[in-house]
Image (cartoon, grey):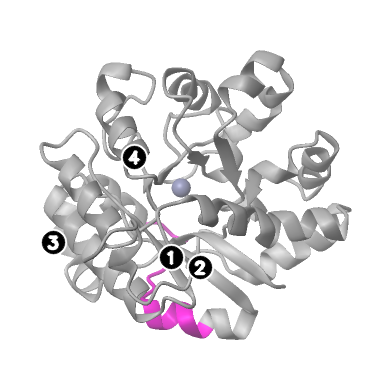
Amino acid sequence: MKNIDFHIHLYPPEIIRDAAAISEREPYFGALTKGKVHKWATVDDLLLRMERDEVERAVVGSFAFQDLGLCRLCNDYVIDCVRAHQDKLDGLCVVPPLAAGFEAEIARCAEAGLVGVGELFPDGQNIDITDISQTWRLAKAVHEANMCLMWHIADPVGHDYVGKGSAGPKEAAAFCVNHPEVRVIFAHLGGGLWVYELMPEMRLYLSNAMYDLAAMPWLCEARALKTIEAAGLAEKFLMGTDYPILGTARYEKLFADSGISAATADAINRLNAVALLKRLNRVENSADPRQSRGGGA
Ligand SMILES: [Zn+2]
């Protein structure tokens, strides 16, 4: 299934090696990486999988820690991966969005050619995304860098899982009401926020919001995709697996079972991502991603 995978977590080898020690001061990381579905992956694992599963491009992120130093280490890794594989990869950076100095880290990553910030964890990083006094600096930094911003969002109902958190569609909507200009991607189908795109005023507030399918095989039935198509919202969805905890195979079944048209499937799988990437901080076919903001090195 040809696709662009927009939701991927890669881990620098040092993070994998030191995971036990890091877990002691990063409880959210500890909980997730000790969870029963957790898997590690480095860029080499991803490249093998891309080859095998016909993933044409991947937008890779790492893990959003509370500590800015650990985030920087992850960002260095993502920058190196993207530079080494520009034909296959784009990258997202991570920051703790209330820490002193996070704006400079976003600017550094934008300068290095990364296209966005995320997946950030409202609960794991202790930020209330409904509180404009906590979010305005982040919104400004992301917007000025011409990046997208990916938030982990969960359904407010249904089964619990490690890392689910309490930021749901209501909180995600509040973020967009406060910052409608930010190109935001709400992971995990935005916890159902897309349904409220059928309210005219919310459609306006959510003009720059998109949703990804990360972990969808574990969350809801395939026919949700048919509902999304019927609601005219297919253009707002991005394929994203949450690799390495999920791969392409489960999504192939999901798409096959969904009943959506081939055109809708192609939009969600590839074309929406192509269009979004064109608008973000990056120049196609640039020999050096550091030149992606139009200036020199
Ligand atoms: Zn997530």
Closer mark to the observer between disc 2 and disc 4: 4
Residue lying furthest top in this view?
201
| Residue closest to the eye, 269 or 41 | 269
Q: Which residue is mark 3?
A: 21
The residues tagged by marks 2 and 1 sit, at their Cα atoms, a distance apart of 6 Å
Closer mark to the observer between disc 2 and disc 1: 1
Secondary-structure class at tag 2: strand
Please give the range of residues in magenta.
34-48
The residues tagged by marks 3 and 4 sit, at their Cα atoms, a distance apart of 31 Å
Query: What is the quadrant of the N terminus in the image?
Result: bottom right
| Residue closest to the eye, 7 or 19 | 7
**Looking at numbered disc 1 in the image, what kind of residue is underneath it?**
Asp
Q: Which residue is mark 4?
A: 142
**Looking at numbered disc 4 in the image, what kind of residue is underneath it?**
Val
Q: Which residue is mark 2?
A: 58
Query: What is the quadrant of the C terminus in the image?
Result: bottom left
Q: Earlier in the sequence, mark 4 or mark 1?
A: 1
Q: Earlier in the sequence, mark 3 or mark 4?
A: 3
Q: Which residue is mark 1?
A: 90
Position of residue 114 measured from the top left corner of the image (x, y, whole percent): 35, 59
Q: Are marks 2 and 4 in contact (CB under 8 Å)?
A: no
